[in-house]
Amino acid sequence: MNKELIEFIRDHYKTKDFIPLHEPSFDHREEEYVLETIKSTFVSSVGTHVDSLEKKIAGYTGSPAAVATVNGSSALHIALKLAGVKHNDLVITQPLTFVATCNAITYCGASPIFIDVDKNTLGMSPTALDTWLSDHAYIDPDNLCRTIKEDKVIRACLPMHTFGHPADLDGLNEVARRWKLILVEDAAESLGSFYKGRHTGTIGTLGILSFNGNKIITTGGGGMILSNNSIAKKAKHLTTTAKTQHHFEYNHDEIGYNYRLPNLNAALGCGQLEKIEKLIESKRSLAGKYNTLFKNSSIQFITEPPQCRSNYWLNSIICEDQEQRDELLEFTHKNSVMTRPIWRLMNYLPMYKHCLRGSLKNAEWLEQRVVCLPSSAQLGEQD
Ligand SMILES: *Cc1c(COP(=O)(O)O)cnc(C)c1O
């Protein structure tokens, strides 16, 4: 299987050189927008591209509003603040995620609680969430969800759409509502992924996207907060140093952040967003081929959950066991094809190992078996 895999990947990308896991693709359009931005001198926090990128992302995702930020991590930080997360609060998330998810919780002075994921979606399991809350939490007279033992407020629930595959949002929404938790979606990896026709990141009260260099589209570094209009207004205020509106005076009414996406980065993003559907088409076609390749093997290719359209940002497989996984990783690396195991679970990291958690059986099982495969999109010659 390993040899066949290398042959397949080399044939697909038509190169004998090193094949990365994911690389961005640019053409004339991005060059044109970036150059024009440099010439205009509006390279920083004010400019037409940053406003335009917000409008286009809102339009594409169907979100009432979108606020651009310097990266996905800062978007998450502000989203959690606007969800009301305070010092000493708790926020429920999944152990199978990129560390930025947990770090954002910590930036608010809160701590994560780790709840297991579904084996099918790789996202937070609504059943595991409800079970843990039933055993460990109660609703106080002020309608706040609190832990029984520590009597701390659990303010929000932060699931993540792993590799672009939507989590079970109906299930999570229902449990979060019942337990008075604000649902915030980490949709950093899932631009272009839809759950029952609705874009990921628009179903919770807030959602965030990332435009880091390894994501499906990039602004170099960048992110976006998705929310309704009144929350977006606060998000814009907080991410622009909480400066009050005035044509020349400097006045700030709270501690804000310098988190606004520069116009130069937004210019790149506007060019990228124009071809998002082509990128997804290319990725979905590659996913289909990977799926066929693994059909009669002991390896399971991870496909989009039912009633979802996934962007297949990173194609990934589940090996039979850790031994098979390690062999595959070694073999591909020796053959200059980049593959990666999934993240170390958050509850094993030194800064998060003391956090509350439920049974993490599925996350542990997946951690030993999942491998990400080369997933760059290929766009034909364009002008
Ligand atoms: C990329 C990513 C982020 C953070 O985005 P940055 O733009 O790199 O700060 C957050 N969460 C997840 C799951 C990610 O994959």
Image (tube, grey):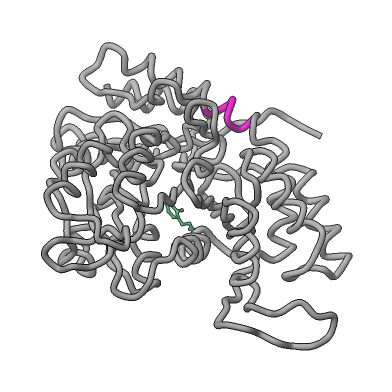
Please name the residue shown 74% across and 45% down the image: 271
Q: Is residue 287 above or below residue 222?
A: above
Which residue sits at x=33%, y=34%?
171
Nearer to us in this view, 35 or 98: 98
Q: In the image shown, does 264 or 165 lie closer to the viewer?
A: 165
Residue at x 16%, y 46% (from the top left corner): 134
Q: Nearer the viewer, residue 269 or 130?
A: 130
Quarter the C terminus occupies: top right
Q: Position of residue 217 (x, y in %)?
A: 60, 45
Name the image quarter holding the N terminus.
top left
Q: Which segment is the magenta one?
A: 278-283
Could you say which quadrant of the image residue 45 lies in? Answer: bottom right
Observer-nearest of 285 and 146: 146
Q: Is residue 172 magenta?
A: no
Residue 7 sits above or below residue 39 on the image = above
**Residue found at the far top of this picture:** 296
Task: Report the residue at 18% width, 38% height from top.
Answer: 362
